[in-house]
Amino acid sequence: MTKRCCCGEGARFGVLGLVFMLAAILPVAGQVIENLDEEFQFASGLVELGFPDFADKVVQQILRLHPDQKSRAQLIQAEVLISRRKFEDAEKLVVEMGMDNTKAQAISLALARGYYSIGDTDKASKLYTEFFKRYETRMPTDPDLLRFYQDSAYQFGQMLEMAGQTEDAIKAYGRILTTKPDKQTQRRILAKQAELYVKQAGSITDRAQQEKLLGEAKKLCDTIQWGGMDVWFGQSVITLAHMDLVKGDRAAAEKTLMGNLDIFKEIDQFLKEEGLPLSVSPMAGARFLLGELFQYQAETMEKQKRGQDEIVAMYGKSLTEFYNVFAKYGESDWGQTAGVRAGAIKSVLEDRYGRKVNVDLGQKAAAAVAGYFKLPDNLFRQKKYQAAVDEYIKTLNQFPETEVTPVALGNMMESYAELGDVLMVKTILSYTAERLAGNDTAALALLRIGKYYFDKKDEPMYMLAYNAYLEGFPKHDRAAAILFTLAGLKKQQGDEQAASQFFEQIVKNYPKDQYYPRALSQMAWGYYAATNYEKAVEGFRVFIKESQPSPGKALAQFALAESLRQLNRLNEASVEYEIVIQWLAPKNNPYGTSVADVKKNQELLEKAVFQRAYCYAKMTEPADSVADFRSRAIRGYDQFISLFADSAMAPPALSAKGTVQLEVGQHDAAMQTFDQLAAKYPNSPEGKSALFALTRSAMEIKLYDQARSAFEKMLANSKAYSADEFTRIGQLMLDAKLYPEAVKAFTHVRGSTEERALLERALFGLGSAYYAQKDYPNAVEALEEMMQRYPKSGLFYDAKFTLGRAYRETGRLDDAVKAMTDVFKFADTPVLLNQASYDLGMIQKEQGDKVAALASFLRIGLLADPENPELRPLVEKSLLESINIGMELERYDDVQDSAELYLKIFPEGEAVAMVRQVRQDARLRAAQQAAASAQPAAPAGQP
């Protein structure tokens, strides 16, 4: 077996080779495994190469032969779990074993490596930090733990390096050296540490600290160079040249590079011939640093205002070096930066000097730029939001508009959100929507921050994000879906108007989107639920036109018909109900495929047949078709009863049919229908009250003889009918001025129930009916009982007015005044107050108190609003009463005022001629009064 190298180097078995080797090396039953370390390492290698099932078989075989190796086997089993992303199961193993167990410690390192592989650097860093803190002053001795130690130290160093923690990265790499690795690994680590020392020195301005760091780098480079000529020797030379640049000694750096070019080329050639990766070639660093030197010289020439050709030539040399590093050594540590620098110099040559540069950096340049965002991206993934924001700002200032800018802005928004800086989130939102409008990646960034705030239930912020998205990216493929989602949220909140606006945007702007018909449907249903039937009709018609046969389309068609019926557009409604029937009546129609859908459609069909008949029963235009409509209604109800005899709507259908028959003069047929209703559906509300239905129907269409006849039959079998039904019939009779029948109905209620809702209504109706028949004593009795039982009745004012008038008719004038006084106590509207004043005036008139009566009538005539349609008749009557009483009292000025006001308000009134005549008489008599009062009195003592 070949031991794995901690830094990813060393021999690797081919896939097929591993499979065959597995078959060859699995021990047979009873065979003892001599080298367990090798077998466990082999099993671990199988996991790493993507063969966890084979690894598990190896471990199971080992356990059968060596059951005492359970702890080591658990380590491999944990690696298998981690390879399958079952991190929680692996963590449970660690907990079960305890962190003092070295195998558990090895599993924790395997977990860290697994988390790192999926980008969860936060968890990986935590596990690595905890582990290396445990071994800060010592080395592990367990062979399995050592096997993970080197790889983990190197990976931890990479993480720290990417996070900008250079000093900690150097320390992490140093841990590898304490394990006494092979010579090549040791030299590679020394080269990496030297490079990081120089990088750290270049990032600070403290000269003393800088010299110290560069001194450490120099020691490491010397150690490497004493070890012989190889790749790492070349890298140490590059590091030394880099040190000169950090010190500002460019001449020394150039001398070092140029003096060792032959060595770099030799190493480069060796790597090519051996098929080894060029990413470690020192030629990459050499050419990059030469590019930097040439660029510096070009910039110096610009400051010195040297010749343009000379400057361009030097920039060209720099571009050549950077481009070659980027093209040939793109995977090296220098390649990414070289691509960016090449792009910048290309722009200088083209934009500043107008030179054509035949260099195509292509997608690799974009990848190079993207590399600069790795540090802030990693900080963001580690949830180090402030540090991530700081790095994003630096990087975006250098590369403001690149392919990765939208993602960076999205991460910045989320970072600021986590930091609670709402103002910055809003600023970046606006910038992204405006400057990157139309960019799909930017659109996703806004959707991401919208989802962030949605999960936080922060409605103002997620609405701001989604609205910015819709404004900046209206053509994005998820725009309609977002609008639909927002509309749904608004509907849940009960904001139908806002929901409708979102649906309307979909309908207006996305007619080909899959959400278009759904938005149409939702709009229509929203209007329907809000009883905006006009809009519902428009929406359903468009939706139905755009939709394919489905249960939803059938339901929408029925709702369209219902909306038209609610609008009393019955002719149109009947047509739409007919369409529902045509769609759903045939078996195996395409409007319902599941059992549930078919059942729902049957219910729709049932309602459509019923409502179609209802429309025909109520349609009145054109007038010459009414007879035909009623015939269709009767046939429609017959069809319904035939098809849906067991339906809950069958009794109402029979009752409605009987009503139509009464209307068209088929009285005998109607009686038969109501008899059929009682016989066929005796337990239904309609069947139990067939005579009531007949009476009510006859009353509604003013067939009073038939109504009286049916009502008498109800009275003869009154126990079969409820007090509620008698109350309703009594009211119908009262409204139709059939007062004797109203008295009978209300009297029955009075003697059969104590239920307030019925008895209160019956007592008032009884009093009103008696009053209308001029049976004032009985009217008083009924109304007094009502007010005694229900002093705070909702019919208080109506009852008091009627009672007051009944008192007046029976000569109980004081009681009549008291009734009006009660009204004055509680009345709070002009109509009630003025009506009470009028009635009081009439009572005062009968009492003989004409002066008080005149005051009551004048109060109404002069102060009430004649433009109020409810008060206008009262004003007219009051003015006429004022005129008459004024003449009787010889108060001619009041008469003239009332007459003038009457003629002004009622110029076409029936009493105009009489009022004019009275006005003239009042003027004459007023003049006579004035003359009489002006005539001097006879002297004293004269006859």
Image (tube, grey):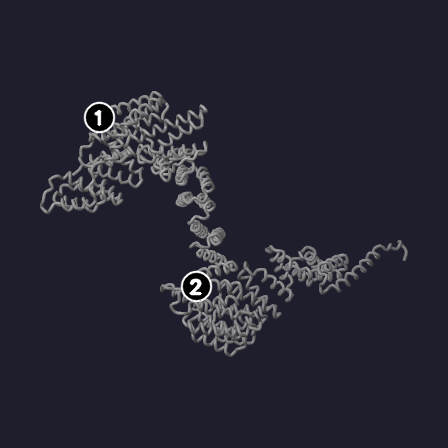
Q: Which mark is residue 397?
A: none
Q: Which residue matches tag 2?
A: 554
Vertical side of 612 occupied by 790: above or below: above
Of residue 542 and residue 452, the one placed in the foreground of this image is 542
Res 425 visible? yes
Sequence-wise, the earlier of marks 1 and 2 is 1
**Label 2 element class:** helix
Query: Residue 596 occupies which quadrant of the picture?
Result: bottom left
Q: Position of residue 29 (x, y in %)?
A: 10, 47
For discs 1 and 2, the disc positioned in front in the rendered view: 1
Res 456 visible? no
Give the CA distance from mark 1 to mark 2.
Answer: 86 Å
Of residue 51 and residue 449, the one placed in the foreground of this image is 51
The amino acid on which the numbered mark 2 sits, given as a three-letter code, is Ala
**428 left or right of 898?**
left
**110 left or right of 459?**
left
Vertical side of 939 occupied by 440: above or below: above
Q: Position of residue 726 (x, y in %)?
A: 51, 69
Q: Which residue matches tag 1?
A: 227
Instruction: State yes or no: discs 1 and 2 in contact (Cβ < 8 Å).
Output: no
Q: Position of residue 172 (x, y in %)?
A: 27, 31
